[in-house]
Image (cartoon, grey):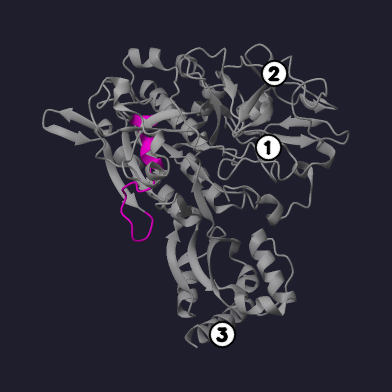
């Protein structure tokens, strides 16, 4: 009865604010799934009882709206304010689902979306892999003085490879920890965040430098948002990003690593998660995001295209896909992984990923007894491999774009140690312009007995393979933003690359000697211009033939249910 009275009071108050009530119609201030829920309740009496229930939503208010006033009104009416999200001028609220359409009519409301579930990006087919930053490390660069915020499942700061020894004894390089998961501390019960932190910052204490991270002296800021099963929510991630910005000066946080994501339901311009990462970027923090692991997903008949997850779909951030080094130092035998998500992004057609990095069967730190450890004990690395007599494993193998993102985050830390005045846009531009563009036109890989034909086009490899050495040696200080371009179709069906006018790419920048990012045609008929060799959709090749005219990628009626078909969601 109390909930019913609260709902009625809230309804009365909302009608007082708005001066009217409206019958349901799809509202652009409501996310697709919330519109769907309201529509079902209006047309199906069986769903009306469910619609009277309370639902957790993130409400973003328009600039200038008095957030405190809106919070007070909702609380006084019986709603619940669960968390303040000043970063996106909004908050997390619990309100009756039956009032969603009325709330959306508030002139101060910009957008309402559910507090969606976030998951880590990982796969469970692993072995050791390698990275090629040895020359940089040998020059003495180790990320010292740079803070990296790892927003993940937590980090076990007691792992020896995250410890240093100084004049006053041993100290942890995890300099700050906070949990945004209700009822849980900041330790890593899942095992994902510790692995990610090790790729960024592990110093090889246990293995005698056999396993060392990209930037072995960075400080880790541990912000836990995922539970023991690797799941979390939008609001937790937004709160963690907000905290990282608040701690930026105290710990010199220059990088945020987000090896997690979820499906896309609306434009990045409305998505609260995307809006949060943009605020971090504008605050001077490089945000590195995993592309997702849905490259094998053909549920939309796109052969894995348009499977980039949020917030990797945001044009500001650096979105990273995964390639397989095949356990060798040379790049001549490298191939893309079958699971690495491909662009363009759903709905907005942002060209992603931005680049790719090693992500298959990567060795890093083990969180002993964690969920992943219990599920896959065979992925523990035997101490005998690094000539240790220890009986307890300290390392673990994982695959996925999560690992690729962590490797790029470590590379960024090295770049910023070398030249601390680089802006996030300059870092992104250097990484992309200096990425290696030497790779095959296509390859065939086998995963779990299934063969996948992979084409090395702009939506698969982005600007190319991570090359930390060339990115650090670059003397380029480009001006402008580094917003990822958009893929657009002209009246003739040609797919063009459209750069934002504010971006570095808008000046027809030549990448190396053969690749032009400007207004050149990317796709005309069955051919894509990406270097001089890649042909898209040609039946004489082993690549995937995408029928763009009928593809969901270019459709105008994409619904929420169509957009969410992958396991990660």
Binning the other alpha carbons within 10 Å of mark 2 as few (below 14), some (14 to 19) or many (20 upward) gives some
Q: CA distance from mark 2 to mark 3?
A: 62 Å
Instruction: Say few, some or many: other residues with alpha carbon within 10 Å of mark 3 (under 14 / 14 to 19 / 20 or more).
Output: some
Where is mark 3, residue-wise?
A: 8
Q: Contact (CB < 8 A) between labels 2 and 3?
A: no
Please identify, in this view, whether the residue under mark 1 or under mark 3 is nearer the observer.
1
Dot 3 falls on a residue whose secondary structure is: helix
- Give the residue at mark 1: 304
Name the element at disc 1: loop
Viewer-closest of 132 and 384? 384
Residue 430 visible in this rendered orientation of the protein: yes
Q: Nearer the viewer, mark 2 or mark 3?
A: 2
> Which of marks 3 and 2 precedes in the sequence?
3
Q: Which residue is mark 2?
A: 441
Label 1 with label 3: CB-CB less than 8 Å: no
Q: Residue at x 86, y 27 (%)?
A: 525
Residue located 48% across and 15% down the image:
328
Please tell me in which quadrant of the rendered image residue 35 appears: bottom right
Q: Is residue 479 visible?
A: no
Above or below for 263 versus 81: above
x and y, in percent, of residue 557 in the image: 78, 52
In the rendered structure, which disc, 1 or 2, sits on the residue that comes first in sequence? Answer: 1
Residue situated in front as seen by the camera: 497 or 62: 497
Residue stretch in magenta:
180-201
Residue 431 image point, x, y percent = 52, 23
On the picture, is 310 further left or further right than 183?
Answer: right
């Amino acid at each position: 009865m109390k909930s019913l009275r609260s709902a009625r009071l809230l309804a009365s108050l909302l009608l007082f604010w708005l001066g009217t009530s409206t019958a349901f119609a799809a509202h652009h201030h409501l996310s697709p799934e919330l519109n769907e829920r309201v529509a079902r309740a209006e047309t199906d009496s069986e769903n009306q009882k469910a619609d009277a229930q309370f639902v957790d939503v993130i409400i973003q208010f328009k600039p200038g709206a008095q957030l405190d006033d809106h919070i007070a009104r909702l609380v006084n009416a019986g709603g619940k304010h669960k968390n303040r999200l000043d970063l996106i001028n909004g908050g997390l609220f619990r309100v009756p689902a039956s009032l969603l359409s009325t709330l959306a009519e508030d002139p101060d409301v910009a957008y309402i979306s559910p507090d969606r579930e976030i998951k880590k990006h990982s796969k469970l087919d692993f072995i050791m892999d390698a990275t090629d930053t040895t020359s940089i490390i040998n020059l003495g660069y180790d990320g010292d003085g740079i803070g990296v915020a790892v927003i993940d499942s937590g980090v076990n700061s007691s792992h020896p490879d995250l410890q240093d020894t100084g004049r006053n004894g041993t100290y942890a390089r995890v300099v700050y920890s906070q949990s945004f998961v209700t009822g849980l501390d900041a330790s890593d019960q899942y095992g994902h965040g510790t692995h990610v932190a090790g790729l960024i910052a592990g110093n090889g204490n246990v293995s005698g430098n056999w396993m060392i991270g990209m930037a072995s002296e960075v400080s880790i800021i541990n912000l836990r948002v995922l539970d023991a099963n690797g799941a979390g929510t939008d609001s937790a991630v937004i709160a963690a990003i907000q905290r990282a910005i608040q701690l930026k000066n105290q710990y010199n946080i220059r990088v945020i690593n987000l090896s997690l994501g979820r499906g896309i339901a609306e434009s990045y311009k409305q998505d609260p998660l995307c809006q949060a990462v943009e605020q971090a970027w504008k605050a001077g923090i490089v945000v590195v995001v995993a592309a997702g692991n849905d490259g094998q997903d053909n549920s939309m008949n796109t052969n894995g295209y348009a499977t980039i997850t949020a917030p990797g779909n945001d044009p500001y951030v650096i979105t990273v896909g995964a390639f397989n080094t095949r356990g060798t130092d040379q790049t001549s035998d490298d191939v893309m992984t079958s699971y690495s998500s491909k662009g363009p992004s759903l709905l907005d057609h942002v060209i992603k990923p931005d680049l790719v990095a090693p992500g298959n069967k990567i060795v890093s730190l083990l969180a002993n007894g964690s969920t992943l450890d219990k599920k896959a004990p065979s992925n523990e690395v035997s101490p005998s491999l690094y000539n240790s007599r220890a009986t307890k494993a300290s390392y673990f193998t994982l695959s996925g774009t999560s690992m690729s993102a962590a490797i790029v985050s470590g590379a960024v830390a090295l770049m910023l140690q070398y030249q601390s005045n680089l802006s996030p846009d300059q870092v992104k531009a250097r990484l992309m312009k200096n990425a290696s563009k030497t790779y095959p036109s296509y390859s065939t890989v086998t995963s779990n007995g299934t063969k996948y034909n992979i084409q090395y086009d702009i939506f698969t490899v982005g600007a190319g393979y991570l090359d930390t050495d060339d990115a650090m040696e670059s003397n380029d200080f480009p001006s402008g933003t580094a917003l990822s371009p958009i893929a657009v179709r002209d009246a003739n069906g040609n797919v063009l690359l459209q750069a934002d006018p504010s971006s570095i790419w808008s000046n027809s920048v030549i990448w190396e000697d053969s690749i032009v990012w400007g207004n050149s045609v990317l796709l005309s008929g069955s051919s894509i211009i990406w270097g001089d060799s890649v042909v898209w959709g040609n039946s004489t090749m082993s690549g995937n033939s995408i029928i763009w005219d009928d593809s969901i990628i270019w459709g105008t009626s994409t619904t929420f249910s169509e957009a969410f078909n992958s396991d990660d969601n």
